Each structure stands twice: as structure tokens, then as C-alpha cells.
């Protein structure tokens, strides 16, 4: 009986995780043109971790990175997705909503698994390990790649400028120096291509 209860809890969690497919992000996909959902985003990040593993800090456990990436956005089932360039007040509200969601969603699992998966989510949020920092860097790089592929995407739709994007690149650099350099080059190329607005000129006073 106990084994069946454990399996029931695991299946309930798996079913709940599937609801992430209905959470839409700001990122625009092409062919056909539509918004990316958060489950697609998480899968794409896991693929990136596999493909870009050699650019992680030495000794990074890529399996742990992938596990973090697969669970990091499950809280959006309750909290929804927040645009990365949202203001500070919105970000603070989102943080509270996501922690409340984590308390509910991960507790669907049997207690031992719940503690493990919640630990992965907390580790990702707190960036306290090289795995978490690399995972967070990939999470920042992926929308940039999507915006380039979409010819500007959310950058153009929301009037984002190069300095705003570069502020987010610091998180990529914190996880991988090589990917950070690549991201900075990507921003410069996007400005030259006219798909990202340059930073506003500083006032001379």
C-alpha cells in the first residue's frame, strides 16, 4: 500500500508539472510565429547544458545543472512568468509568489524527493554553486538567442536597449566567462544589425 501511495504522489507531481506547457513567456518563436511556453524554455535550456557543457567551470556536474533547469520554472504554474525587464516592485512580488508556489508544488512529491527537488530549486535561485551559476547563465542566454533568431523579438516590442541587455549579461559571465564573452559579442552584433537599440547617449549636462 505504501508503495502505491508513493507512486500516486509521484504521478500527481508529474501531471502537475505538465501544466507548465500552458504558461506563456514573452519570448517569441518563429515559423510559426507564437510565444514560447515555459516547458519549451526549460527543455531548450537542458539541451543547451548538454551542448555547452565544455564552457562550464571545471568540475561542474552537468547532470545536476540539467536537473535544476528542468525544475527551475515549475513555480510558474502558480506564479506565471515575469518579463526579465520588469521593475523592482514587480520582481519582489514575483519572488514571494514563486516561493509560495514552490512550497505547494514540490510538496506533491514523497517527502524525500520533495526535499531533493526543492533543494535544487533553492540552489538555482541562490546561485551558491558553480552548477547553479552556470544554469542561471544559460537561463539568461537563451532568450537573447531567441531574440536574435526572431529579428529583435521582445527587444524591439518592448523598446529594450543594449545597456539593459548588457546588465543581464553579467549573470551569464558569472556562470561562464566564455559564454559571457559570447553574449557581449552577440549584443554588439545585434546593435550593428539594427535589431537592438543602442544604449542612450549620456547627457552632457
Image: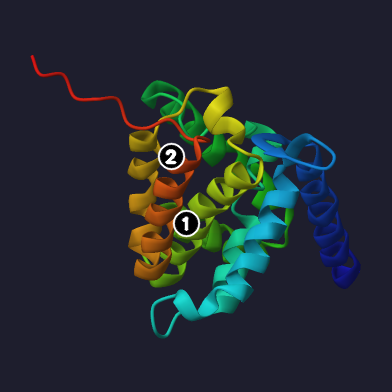
Query: What residue is shown with label 1?
Result: 136
Which quadrant is home to the N terminus? Answer: bottom right
Furthest-left residue in this view: 205
Q: Position of residue 119 (x, y in %)?
A: 52, 62
134 up-or-down from 148: above or below: below
Q: Residue at x 39, y 69 (%)?
A: 178
Query: What residue is shown with label 2?
Result: 191
202 up-or-down from 122: above or below: above
Q: Residue at x 65, y 65 (%)?
A: 46
Q: Residue at x 33, y 51 (%)?
A: 170
Quarter of the rendering containing residue 121: bottom right
Counting the numbered discs, the total is: 2
The answer to whether residue 135 is seen in the rendering is yes
Packing grade of label 1 (10 A; few <14, some 14-19, many >=20) is: many
Is residue 130 found left or right of 64 in the rendered image? Answer: left
The answer to whether residue 127 is seen in the rendering is no
Q: Position of residue 111 (x, y in %)?
A: 66, 62
Query: Sequence order check: which comes first, mark 1 or mark 2?
Result: 1
Q: CA distance from mark 1 to mark 2?
A: 24 Å
- In the image, 152 versus 120, the foreground residue is 152
Element type at marker 2? helix
Amino acid at each position: 500500500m505504501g508503495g502505491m501511495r508513493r507512486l500516486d504522489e509521484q504521478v500527481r507531481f508529474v501531471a502537475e508539472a505538465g501544466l507548465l506547457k500552458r504558461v506563456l513567456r514573452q519570448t517569441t518563436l518563429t515559423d510559426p510565429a507564437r510565444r514560447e511556453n515555459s516547458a519549451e524554455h526549460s527543455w531548450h535550456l537542458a539541451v543547451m547544458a548538454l551542448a555547452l557543457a565544455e564552457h562550464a567551470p571545471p568540475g561542474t556536474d552537468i547532470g545536476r545543472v540539467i536537473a535544476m533547469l528542468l525544475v527551475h520554472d515549475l513555480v510558474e504554474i502558480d506564479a506565471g512568468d515575469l518579463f526579465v525587464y520588469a521593475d523592482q516592485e514587480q520582481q519582489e512580488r514575483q519572488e514571494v509568489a514563486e516561493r509560495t508556489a514552490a512550497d505547494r508544488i514540490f510538496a506533491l512529491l514523497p517527502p524525500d524527493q520533495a526535499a531533493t527537488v526543492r533543494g535544487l530549486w533553492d540552489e538555482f535561485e541562490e546561485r551558491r554553486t558553480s552548477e547553479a551559476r552556470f544554469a542561471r547563465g544559460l537561463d539568461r542566454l537563451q532568450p537573447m538567442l531567441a531574440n536574435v533568431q526572431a529579428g529583435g523579438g521582445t527587444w524591439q516590442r518592448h523598446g529594450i536597449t543594449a545597456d539593459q541587455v548588457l546588465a543581464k549579461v553579467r549573470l551569464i559571465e558569472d556562470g561562464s566567462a566564455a559564454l559571457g564573452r559570447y553574449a557581449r559579442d552577440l549584443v554588439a552584433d545585434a546593435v550593428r544589425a539594427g535589431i537592438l537599440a543602442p544604449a542612450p547617449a549620456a547627457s552632457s549636462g
